[in-house]
Amino acid sequence: MAETDFEPKIVAFLCNWCTYTGADLAGTSRIQYPPNVRIIRLMCSGSVDPTYVLKPLLDGADGVLIGGCHPGDCHYQSGNYKARRRVVALKEILKGAGIDEDRVWLRWISASEGQRFADTITEMTEFLKDKGSNPMRREWAV
Amino acid sequence: MVVSRDYTYMCSDPGQALIKQDIQEYDLNRVVVAACSPRMHEPTFRSAARQQGVNPYQVEMANIREQCSWVHKDQEQATKKATALVASAVAKARYLHALEEREVDVTPGVVVIGGGVAGMAAALDVADTGIRAYLVEKEGYLGGRVADLNRTFPTLESVPQLLGPLVERVEQHPSITVMLNSKVSGVDGYVGNFEVIVAEGGTVDGEAPNERSLSVGTIIVATGYDVFDPDRKPEFGYSNYPNVITSLEMEERLMRGDLTVGGRTPERVAFIQCVGSRDVQLGNPHCSRVCCMYTAKQSRLVRETLPDADVTVFYIDVRTFGKGSEEFYDQSRSKGVRYRRGNVSEIYRKPGNPDRVVLALEDTLLGEPVEFEADLVVLAVGMEPRGSAAEISQLLKLPRSADGFFLEAHPKLRPVDTAMAGVFLAGCCQGPKDIPDTVAQAKAAASSALIPLVRGSVPVESATAVVNEELCAGCGMCVDVCPYDAPSMNQLWGVSRINAVLCKGCGACAVTCPSKAIRLQHFTAEQVLAQVDALVE
């Protein structure tokens, strides 16, 4: 059941060349989206270490977004493919650890897709609101 | 945290002076700037730090403008988020290390994509310095859209007389390589050293294109615009009535000196403005910026050719902002061109009058419906982004603005730069422009594209990956995963070593390394996890 007044906390790892620039474009275009996302800039989605995803989830973040270039567009040729494979493997591990793997999103958003970035954040925020807060938050609080 | 300051424009000279002064006064070794995107002003603040002896990699930015204040209306929530972003930047700053700044030599040479007026003007300026310009044009001729025009506004200069010598200068220039029937099919590399693949010919009879790789330092995009297709406004019956033509067809008719329709000389000529421009329903809310003036020109030339004809322009607003333009528009009216404010809703034929068409409109000054008969109707079609803009945007990773044209790095201060270092914009690919504005922008793009080439070197990524040889187990997974062959196995020591010149800093090896022996500098696990800590707290 959705909690009332629950504001999910999303940590986003965005690649410098596509999604981070797309997020900047959302800004220069003044496209509004929920303030629930906190962005960390990396050079490539392929440099997202599994611990970068695990730590926020264990610390109580409600969702983690990884944003990279569209397939074929990676600034480093193949970093986004590496990210894709890692996320698939990581989701299996999350499942095994009893963490809801749907809290981790991987999305391809290009430098020209400011609207798509804003829509993704809106969608993810709504999705996590429905899902409710990360139970880790309470467990660790004990 | 030793000192914190608040200032309106940190990137301005006084703002930077504040930072520099504090570095001196408090002997600072880390600086965090909470302002715009690091993609905008990180180089500015890095340079300010460098001047005071602080390593530029010990500067961190919190993006609280593009990714916070500009996208959230709720001030309280936005402030909360900004606070978290600043905390995250400070947390990272704690673990920043000084990195050595390195430069590589550039490859002199510029690829100019598009052989219209913009591309030619840019190529000439580049080539006049003695640096080679490769002018890539997809058609079999130079001149682009301007080659379809008759006379310019507001000087009524003959276009062939203007274009002919320009094309000739380009073709004869010893430092320009003109590549016709050619398209850019691949781009690799970075500012200073791009490899551009140009495919010549092909597609005809299934013939394979002839591919050639060009090594250059910078790229100028001058791919121009598409003309609005009037069939997207079927109510104007462009394909049904021979009386209805586009402004480009009018240019061609004026060049030939033939204004007849079905062998008859028209007595009533109408111009309809803003066809495909300022039209939200069609997805083109933008103004095409040239139609008001070319209509002032065409309507006047029609009046001069057919002094007895009634020439009426139906407009929404008349915009004549260029030098000499308002004067030209006044002259056109004084020569008898009538301007009537009204939005034409439909063009149709009346039974029994097959030679003429009727324009249905509302005269918005009188506030009454009007039917206007005409022998010849000219649709002032506007400019749209090229159909190929999406493809070029993918190829060069160029962002586009909401109107679909390529996006400049800053609307005021960096109008010809793009988000991609070393790629510049000229002409209508960035937005509708007339010829003088196009040439001005092309010359600006040329001079910006020459900066790294004249300087001779460009900074390269210092944030490369490094191996901790004491942890390295010598498995070689980093060698397999690297797209640049930067890591290699040292046979003597049985460990991997990364060639910093080849490393582009993507970090794939650091994640892959099972011993966690590889560290991507400036984005280390320590730094990133410190940011996570600050954000989730």
Image (cartoon, coloured by chain):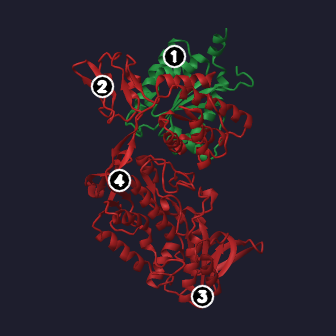
Indicate which label's residue lies in the foreground, 1 or 3: 1
Query: What kind of element bears circle 4?
Result: strand
* Number of disc labels: 4
Q: Which numbered dot is residue A94?
A: 1
Q: Amino acid at mark 3?
A: Ala
Query: What kind of element bears circle 3?
Result: loop
Q: Amino acid at mark 1?
A: Leu
Per the image, the residue denoted by label 2 is B497
Per the image, the residue denoted by label 3 is B309
Indicate which label's residue lies in the foreground, 1 or 2: 2
Residue B64 position by quadrant: top right
Cα–Cα span, label 4 and label 2: 36 Å
- Mark toward the start of the polypeptide (4 vs 2): 4
Cα–Cα span, label 4 and label 1: 44 Å
Crowd rating for badge 1 (residues with CA inside 10 Å; few <14, some 14–19, many 20+): some
Residue B206 position by quadrant: bottom left
Query: What kind of element bears circle 2?
Result: strand
Q: Do marks 4 and 2 share a subunit?
A: yes
